[in-house]
Amino acid sequence: MADRNHPSAKPAARTVLNLGNLPPKKQGFGAAAQYARTPSRVDPNNPPWPAYRGYHEFSFAHETMGKRLPTILGKAVDDEIAKFFRGKDFMNAPWLFAEAYKYRRLHECFSISKYWKDYDVFFRQKCDTFSRSNTAVFELSTRFAEPFAYEEGASEADKLKARELLFHELTQVCLWGNATDLSLLINMTEEDIKNLQSTGGEHLAATEKNILGNHLDRLWKLVSNMKGGRIDFVLDNAGFELYCDCVYADWLVQSGIANEIHFHGKRFAWFVSDVTRKDWDWLLNSMLYGSLFSQATDAEVQSLKQMGQRWKEYERKGQWIYEQHPFWCTGYTFWSISQEAPDLFLHLAESDLVMFKGDLNHRKLTYDCQAPSDTPFDMAIGPLASEDGAPPVVSLRTIKSDVVVGVPGDVSSKLDNEEPGWRISGKYAVVLLSDGLPGKPVSFGQQ
């Protein structure tokens, strides 16, 4: 057994390796060692002189064990793993799948933690963007805080016209509210946000010409025939866009068009700014109890609180229902809903209208393919338009990625030539409607 009291068993003093602190040639572990040679048997645990060890900072052993060896082993493992995935990297994968995979893995990192399971790494950004949207927030709240009412003595024709005008205006508010997308607009100033979120009537009239595929009139014809129906919102961004969605849904209930609104959010942090349950609760609670806008007047604060109270009452009565099906946080496109989530398809089939909000939902509706821009929307969304029982579907999308359908070919060609970045600028939008096949018995697995 090695002698633990032998001088060679003591750890060497740590010396930082630098040009002014190199051990002299005849000291340390050199030829004239300061420790006597081991008198007993020699073996790995009892070398003839003190062994170099990884904790000796003055030695190359420290560099090798701490840096070189992990790198060597890592490269060896990487090479073995790479054999199974040659040519199969993120740049070769379909963009939609690769992007969704990234957020799934990010969620996995937190989900396996004991204390960080429900942590939303993007939550602060979402809150900040809403709190910096005070101009547009109060422009809507001061106008729509009071319950919707017709002018006294209005005829039925006047009431219908009033509903139509408000429908067009609020649908556009809901559409352009999507312009604030945290995953795309990282370094916005407060002035940038105000410009993006302007909700004035004149501004909306000016921007309607930028709706390249415009089914607003068809959508109104469908909605105007509803009385106490059910409308589903497949949500996109939290913060200001969610606020706009709720203002819109509030009016749909008050006008009698809908009596039940289902809001579909995400189960965990997704594509930076997508709505989660935490975002939903935060918005409604902030309107009632928060103090986000320090410069707001008493009237502005009261208008926000009044709307928040009404929205909370909708929740309590079951008129507003927040849901979060796991399918929304997968890499599947919406062509696969009936196969991968038949329960969700059956649930949506009960709706009178499903509104898909934003760019990501539009990409998933259309399979995120390089289809010609004049491809009809019904064709682009495949089974969600042609399957028996498919509900009416509308996509409210500010264009912020490559895929474009439902737009005349000459329009897209002209923009490609004159504004090369138009597909990602957020300047243009589409409102595209599919009538679906509502009322037909659902028959899964049949084409």
Image: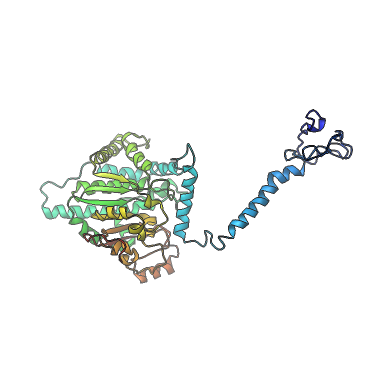
Please tell me how many numbered marks the rendered image carries: 0
Work out whether residue 229 or residue 336 is closer to the camera in this orientation and state it.
336
In percent of width and height, residue 437 lies at: 24, 62
- Where, quadrant-wise, is the N terminus in this rendering? top right
Q: Is residue 203 visible?
A: no
Left or right: where 342 falls relative to 441: right
In percent of width and height, residue 369 lies at: 41, 65
Q: Can residue 113 be seen in this view?
A: yes
In percent of width and height, residue 287 lies at: 32, 38
Q: Residue furthest bottom?
A: 410
Work out whether residue 406 or residue 386 is closer to the camera in this orientation and state it.
386
- Where, quadrant-wise, is the C terminus in this rendering? bottom left
In percent of width and height, residue 260 lies at: 23, 47
Q: Which residue lies furthest to the top in this view?
A: 5
Work out whether residue 67 or residue 176 is closer to the camera in this orientation and state it.
67
Q: What scheme was used to colour the molecule? A: rainbow
**Location of residue 410 (image quadrant):** bottom left
Position of residue 181 relative to residue 307, above or below, is below
**Location of residue 421 (image quadrant):** bottom left
